[in-house]
Image (cartoon, rainbow, N blue to C red):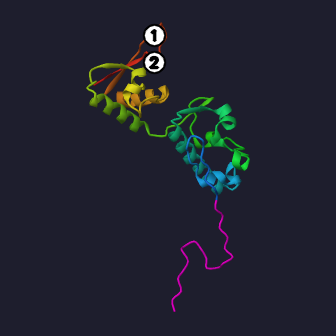
């Protein structure tokens, strides 16, 4: 008589217990991974290997959350208190350390910029928009490039990320940045010429 083996990773011992963690769904519809319901996830683990894995999970969670919410940057000083990302009310846990400082590169002392797509993705998206709308040899403002007219993926694109993506196009010889002023102040009035 043949006996079926249990699936790999399980034993045939009936005393084997399995912990199933609930999936938390935010009001926005974002589904947190099950690790978000594991209380030790919110405490920096002392073992270096465990901490490395935990930091990787935090990085993946931060990028996933920011991509879903189109959150390009957040303030370090208030993120751990205000973002649900770092606070799981269902298990009464908040991050006891700054996972965003550990998992992400800081762009300045007060903000973290999140690249949930690589700059090459954003630059390709911008240039494809320019080509498909016949905008080569024309000048566009940065505001135009991140407005609703630019399409849903570019709409609301953070100015910092937009400038970095345009920098990729400048290096490729596909664009040139132009300084502009609006009432004597630069910024969104800056433009770019595409080739």
Position of the C terminus by quadrant? top left
Mark sitting earlier along the chain (1/2): 1
Residue 193 location in percent, x, y? 32, 21
Residue 163 is drawn in which quadrant?
A: top left
Per the picture, the main secondary structure of the magenta-coloured stretch is loop
The answer to whether one can see residue 43 in this image is no
Mark number for residue 56? Answer: none
Looking at the image, which residue is at 72% across and 44% down?
Answer: 96
Mark number for residue 188? Answer: 2
Looking at the image, which residue is at 70% across and 48% down?
Answer: 90
Q: Is residue 4 magenta?
A: yes
Label 2 residue SS: loop
Asked if the residue under mark 2 is in contact with the one under mark 1, i.e. CB atoms within 8 Å, the reply is yes
Q: What residue is disc 1 on?
A: 182
Q: Is residue 141 magenta?
A: no
Residue 57 location in percent, x, y? 58, 51
- Between the residue at mark 1 and the residue at mark 2, the CA separation in whole angstroms equals 8 Å
174 relative to 118 in the view: left or right: left
Looking at the image, which residue is at 66% across and 42% down?
Answer: 86
Residue 87 is drawn in which quadrant?
A: top right
Residue 167 location in percent, x, y? 40, 28
Magenta span: 1-20
Binning the other alpha carbons within 10 Å of mark 1 as few (below 14), some (14 to 19) or many (20 upward) gives few
The one nearer the camera, 60 or 21, is 21
Seen as rendered, the residue at the extreme bottom is 1
Label 1 residue SS: loop
Residue 77 location in percent, x, y? 68, 31
Seen as rendered, the residue at the extreme top is 183
């Amino acid at each position: 008589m043949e006996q079926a083996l249990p699936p790999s990773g399980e034993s045939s011992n009936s005393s084997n217990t399995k912990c199933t963690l609930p999936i938390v769904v935010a009001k926005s519809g974002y589904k947190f991974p099950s690790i978000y319901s594991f209380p030790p996830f919110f405490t920096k683990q002392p073992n270096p290997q465990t901490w490395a894995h935990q930091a990787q999970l935090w990085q993946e969670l931060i990028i996933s959350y920011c991509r879903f919410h189109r959150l390009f940057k957040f303030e370090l000083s208030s993120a751990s208190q205000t973002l649900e990302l770092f606070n799981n009310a269902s298990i009464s846990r908040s991050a006891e350390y700054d996972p965003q400082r550990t998992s992400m590169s800081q762009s300045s002392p007060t903000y973290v910029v999140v690249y949930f797509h690589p700059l090459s993705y954003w630059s390709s998206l911008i240039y494809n928009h320019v080509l498909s709308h016949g905008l080569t040899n024309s000048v566009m403002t940065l505001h135009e490039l991140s407005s609703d007219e630019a399409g849903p993926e570019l709409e609301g694109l953070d100015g910092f990320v937009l400038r970095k993506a345009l920098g990729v196009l400048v290096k490729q010889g596909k664009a040139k940045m132009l300084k502009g002023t609006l009432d004597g102040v630069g910024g969104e009035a800056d433009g770019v010429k595409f080739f």
